[in-house]
Amino acid sequence: MSQHFLLSKKVRDFSLIKLLNWSDDDYFNFLKHIKFKGEESTVCPECGAIKPPRFLKTRKQWRCRDCDRSFSLFSGTVLANSKLTLRKIVLAMYLYSSETKGISMSQLSRDIDVSYKTAFTLLHKFKEAITQTEDLTPLKGHVQIDGGHFGGKPRSGQFRRIGRPEDIVAKIKLGKSQGAKRSRISRANLERKKRNRRIIINLRQLGPKGTGAVRTICRVAMAEDEKHVMSLIRRFVEPGTYIETDESSAYLQCSLGYKHETVQHSTEYSTIDGVNNNQAESFFSRIRRWEYGVSHRMEAKYMQDYANEFAWRENTRRYTQLEKLRCLADKVLSSGLSRWWCGYWQGIKRDDEMLWKA
Ligand SMILES: [Zn+2]
């Protein structure tokens, strides 16, 4: 069996030690190289002119030859007007991109010595950059689709799951097995569950045999039903594509315009012919580990942001450390201004959640 990618030597091409030994100029040059893609011309974020701008060495800024306004590395991006040093920003990018299951905001605040609020908006701006630069061209070839329930976990009820000792004794006397007593959920708790529960539907394009999924697109919906599923497929999957799903009735119409096969999950994970949707399933296992171990909470309002982050993590899972850092830096530098996280702590918050409407 081949070696796991994360255990190979290839992946360790850029360590935190190397990054910490960089000088301020190194951080600047690293980002500059990604921003200009090796050429000395860029689109001016002020007027849109594409000309080689003048470099103002002492200020580490550029001045447009057309509109005469100056701009810096992060002008016009999600990190515009950030007061953080480049060192802290690149370090945050490194930690965020290299953790396979994400990094918590409070951990980042301790790692790079910023307040929790700063770490919170910084990580959300990374997610926004990932969302803005998402590749939405339709998936093709071989696609697996599945939906997973997230958020709205009810608090444990008033009663413990295991009954009182006298109940257990009574049950044993009656010859019944020691069945778990169902925890009762209060009405308020049930309402909370209904209100916060969402479905993440993921669509994954598979590569050649043995390579797993190569592209992932996720959308958050209120239900995994025919209406939502089919509108997603029509938008994100090319007609004629081979689609594998589980036996859910939501996918019944997939055979119209697509080659559709199902696996009966109540009896097997893969049919004798190899039909399965294990790649779509495994996506949820990773995002759930993040929910249990890192975030501890998935707010419905920001679930699409989290789903996009994990779709990106999946798409870059075979990247080396340096490739991941470059990829994230590129997304941040080519993003537009932040619509959702500028002035968040001053009370400017996103009004509506991003829900897929069929
Ligand atoms: Zn200009």
Image (spheres, grey):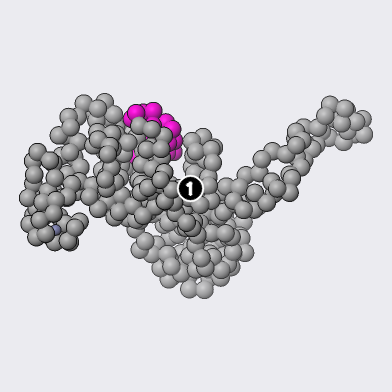
In this rendering, position of residue 2 left or right of residue 62 = right
Residue 324 visible in the displayed image: yes
> Measured from the top left, where is residue 38 in percent x and y?
13, 48
Instruction: Pick the residue in front: 9 or 36.
Output: 36
> Measured from the top left, where is residue 255 in percent x and y?
53, 70
Q: Is residue 315 above or below residue 239?
A: above
Q: Is residue 220 above or below residue 320?
A: below
Q: Point out the stretch of residues depicted in magenta.
A: 97-113
Looking at the rendered image, the quarter that the N terminus falls into is: top left
* Residue under the point 17% across and 50% down: 71
> Measured from the top left, where is residue 183 in percent x and y?
75, 40
Q: Quadrant of ligand 1?
A: bottom left
How many numbered tags mark residues here? 1
Which residue corresponds to mark 1?
283
* Residue under the point 32% across and 55% down: 133
Q: Residue furthest front?
A: 346
Disc 1 is placed on an element classified as: helix
Q: Residue furthest bottom?
A: 256
In this rendering, position of residue 66 left or right of residue 112 = left
Q: Is residue 104 magenta?
A: yes
Q: Is residue 208 above or below residue 124?
A: below
* Residue under the point 38% across and 43% down: 121
> Measured from the top left, where is residue 22 in percent x and y?
19, 29
Can you tell which quarter of the image residue 13 is in? Answer: top left
Tell me the crowding category of disc 1: few under 14, some 14 to 19, or many 20 or more residues within 10 angstroms, Cα based: many
* Residue under the point 54% across and 65% down: 228
Amino acid beneath label 1? Phe
